[in-house]
Image: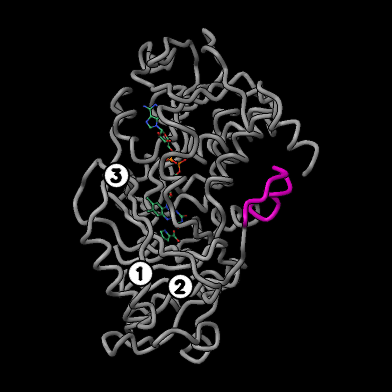
Amino acid sequence: MPLRLLRFALNSRYPEPRMFRTPERLKTSYDVVIIGAGGHGLAAAYYLAKDHGITNIAVLEKGYIGGGNTGRNTTIVRSNYLTAEGVAFYDASVRLWQDLATDFDLNLFYSTRGHFTLAHTDSAMRTMRWRAEVNKHLGVDSELVGPREIEAACPQMDLSCGGHAPILGALYHAPGAIARHDAVAWGYGRGADRRGVEIHQKTEVLGIKLEGRRVTGVRTSQGDIATTKVLCAVAGSTPRITDMVGIRTPIYIHPLQAMVSEPMKPWLDPILVSGSLHVYVSQSARGELVMGASLDPYELHSTRSTLDFVEGLADHMLDMFPFLSHTNINRQWAGMADMTPDFAPIMGRTPVEGFYLDSGWGTWGFKATPVSGKTMAYTVANDRDHELIEGFRLSRFAEYELTGEKGAASVGH
Ligand code: FAD
Ligand code: PYC
C-alpha cells in the first residue's frame, strides 16, 4: 500500500490536500463577483486570474460546484456550426480543450471520437452539405459522407432504422469529442482557487445593488458585498438574475433530459446524432451509453425527469440498435436549458455598467466552457467585448441581426 495512502488512513485530521479551499466567510468587497460555479463561471475566474492578474474575485454558488448543467450534460464537444461567428468561436474552444488537462494537471478523459450528424431526409442532407462547406471554408474538419462510411465507423447500426427513417448520409466531423464534465468544473475551480480566487458554495445571490444604471454590490444569503463588476453565469437561472438589474432578454427555459445505460464493453466509438430520431449517443470511458433527446416541449423551470422521455428515447435507440432491447437504463436526470430564439448565446457587456452576461447556453454550452471563460475574462477585465463574442451581443435582437444556429446547435428542436 502506498505510504501516502497509509498516512491518510491513519491520521484522524485527514491532512490530505483538498481540491479547493473552503473560505470561512465572505469579504466585504471584491474586484469581481461571479454568480454561478458551473464550468463557465469557474473558467472566467480562472482566466481572469491567469491571463489578467485579477484575483480578488468571489465565485458565488447557491448549490455546489458543477451541480448545474455542467454536471448534467452529455459532454459533446465539436465545432461543426453553421454561421461564421459560431464556427470561429467553437473552433477556438476545441483548440483550448487540447491543452486543458495538461494546464490543470488533471485527467479530463477528453476523448476524440469523431462525430456523425445523421441525415434521414433530402432536406437534412442539404443542411449537412451547407455545414460541411461553411466548416471547410473556415478551416474546420467536416465532410459529407455516405452510408458506406457510416457503416464502416459503426457496423452495429441498422442503417434502415427499422425501415422508419433510412439514413442517407451524414456530416462527419473528425474532431468531435467527449470529456468528463465534473473534472472540467473541478479543474477550473482548483486552478482559480490556487491563484487566490475564493469559491463560496451554498451562497445564493438574492439581489444586485445599483446606483442609477451602475453596479455597486451584491446581496447574498451570507451577507452583502461591495463590487463594481458582476458576471452572471447561471444558465437556467438567468431570468432571475437579469430581473434583479431590470434587463430583459429573450431567454426562455426548457428542461433537457438525458439518461445512461448500464455499463457494457466498449463497442461504440463515434458520437452519433440523429435530428429526425431525436437521439444523440456516445459511450463513456465507464462503458455507459450516454443518451439524450430534444428539449421538453414546454417552458418549465424544473429539473424533474419523466418516464415519457425514457420510453421515447429508448424507442428511437432501438430503431438504430435493435440488439440493445435487453439493456437496462441506470439513471436519468434533467437540466434547465436557457434557450435563445437564434440558438446562439448571449455574451458580453449590457446596458447596466459593470453587469456582464454569459448566458443563453441552452443545449450547447459545455463545449464552449474554455472559450467562454477566456473571452468573458477579457471582456470583464477590459470592459470591452472580446471580438470573438461580438456576434453574441444582447443588442442583436433589437438590431434584427440574429446569429442563426438552429440548424447546428443540437438535435431535433
Ligand atoms: P451551469 O453549469 O448550470 O452553472 C450555473 C450555476 O449557477 C449552477 O451551479 C447554479 O446552481 C448557479 N446559480 C444559479 N442561480 C444562482 C444564484 N442566484 N446564486 C448563486 N448561484 C446560482 N452542451 C454541449 O456543448 N454538449 C452537450 O452534449 C450538451 N448536452 C447537454 C445535455 C443536457 C441534459 C443538458 C441539460 C445540457 C447540455 N448541454 C450540452 C448544455 C450545457 O450543459 C450547458 O450549456 C453548460 O453546462 C452551461 O454551463 P454554465 O456554467 O453556464 O451553467
Ligand atoms: O451541442 O452537441 C451538442 C449537444 C448534443 C447534445 C446536446 N447538445
31 vs 16, nearest the viewer: 16
Name the mark on residue 272: 2
Counting residues from the N terminus, which is met first, the one under dot 3 or under dot 1? 1
Q: Is residue 103 magenta?
A: yes
> Magenta span covers which residues?
97-109
Magenta span: predominant SS is: helix
Residue 24 placed where, x, y %?
A: 55, 13
Residue 366, x across and y down, in percent: 49, 50
Going by the numbered disc 3, the residue's amino acid type is: Thr
Please report contact status of discs 1 and 2: CB closer than 8 Å, yes or no. Answer: yes
Q: Are marks 3 and 1 in contact (CB under 8 Å)?
A: no
Q: Residue at x 45, y 79 (%)?
A: 129
Question: Which numbered tag is attached to residue 303?
Answer: 3
Q: Amino acid at mark 2?
A: Leu
What residue would you read off at disc 1?
279
Q: Is residue 168 left or right of residue 248?
A: right
